[in-house]
Each structure stands twice: as C-alpha cells, then as structure tokens.
Amino acid sequence: AGLHALVMSDQPYTIVVAGEEVFEQKLGTCGEEAQHCAGTRLAASVTVLSDSVSGGVRTVEMSRPLRGRTDDHYSFSLAANTTLNLITAVGYSHAFGHHKAHHHATLTLTDAAGAPTCVCDQGGRGDLCHDGGTGCAHFVKECAPPRHDAA
C-alpha cells in the first residue's frame, strides 16, 4: 500500500508484502520513468506481528511508530491526517513490474461527528463506503490491544 498518494508518480511511502518479505519502499524515484519505477528501498521501521494464509487470503499484521523513521517514511498524525489517500497493487510475481491489479482508495479516520479516531477504536461502529457514501458495509471495531508504544 502506498500512503498519501493517488498514483505511483506521487512517490509515496509504501509497505510491500512480497513472498516471505515485508519491506518499506519510496516509489517512483527514477526521474522521467517515475510513474513506473519501483523506487528506493527504505530502512526498516515495520515489525511483523503475524503472517498467515487462510482460504487463499494472506493476512499480515504489523506495527510501526506513528512518526516516520526518515523524511521518506510516512508520519501519521490524527490531528493533521484524518483523511488518507492510498494506492494498492497486486503483481504477477514477486518482482516489481506491471500490475495484475491496482486501485486507489481513501481512508477517513473520523467518527460520525467528524472528530479524529483510530481505525481500531474498540467497540465503535464504522462504515466502508464507495465514493458518494453509497454501497456501505458496516463493521464493529474490534482490534487486539497495542503490543508496544506506537509513538
């Protein structure tokens, strides 16, 4: 997933899951070919907490500090970043190349009143909707307790 981006040429900070590896990358840092460039591998700041496959779906649970390790790492701030654009892609192989599928999305971290909230605000109700607020799916936030300080 590329954070704070709508396209690769936005040069987002990304978290990549490829094969047995989970790593961070700054996409699109290759000059004129930026929109199609794998970019630069970043120093690790993500800790993988679990990695499993069930029914053909891979789930990777990870954590990292809210503040980015460098200027190229994304820094989270609920006060400033209540809406986050992101891009996702699935490749044909573990090597960077043309995407099998890709999409962009927007994640809004506010409650019904517009106040900042966490994705995992225990017991709260949330909605995942298409643009324009249609086709919503409801969910109840139930997340594992934090495993260490995220600051």
Image: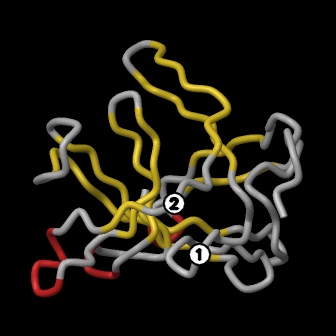
Q: Which mark is residue 102?
A: none
* In the image, farthest residue toward the front: 43
Residue 82, relative to residue 31: is it above or below? above
How crowded is the residue under tag 1: few (<14 C-alpha within 10 Å), some, or many (20+)? few
User: Under tag 1, what secondary structure?
Assistant: loop
Residue 21, relative to residue 25: is it above or below? above
Q: Is residue 41 left or right of residue 133?
A: left
Q: Which mark is residue 43?
A: 2
Front residue of 102 and 46 = 46
User: Under tag 2, what secondary structure?
Assistant: loop
Q: Residue at x 70, y 42 (%)?
A: 139
How crowded is the residue under tag 2: few (<14 C-alpha within 10 Å), some, or many (20+)? few
Q: Residue at x 69, y 54 (%)?
A: 64
Q: Amino acid at mark 1?
A: Thr
Q: Amino acid at mark 2?
A: Ala
Front residue of 2 and 28 = 28
Q: Mark 1 vs mark 2: which is more N-terminal?
A: 2
Residue 150, relative to residue 148: is it above or below? below
Q: Is residue 91 left or right of residue 122?
A: left
Labels 1 and 2 touching (C-beta < 8 A): yes
Colouring method of the image: secondary structure
Q: Residue at x 41, y 76 (%)?
A: 5
Cα–Cα gap, marks 1 and 2: 8 Å
Give the residue at mark 1: 70
Residue 105 screen position, x and y as percent: 43, 64
Residue 87 screen position, x and y as percent: 38, 63
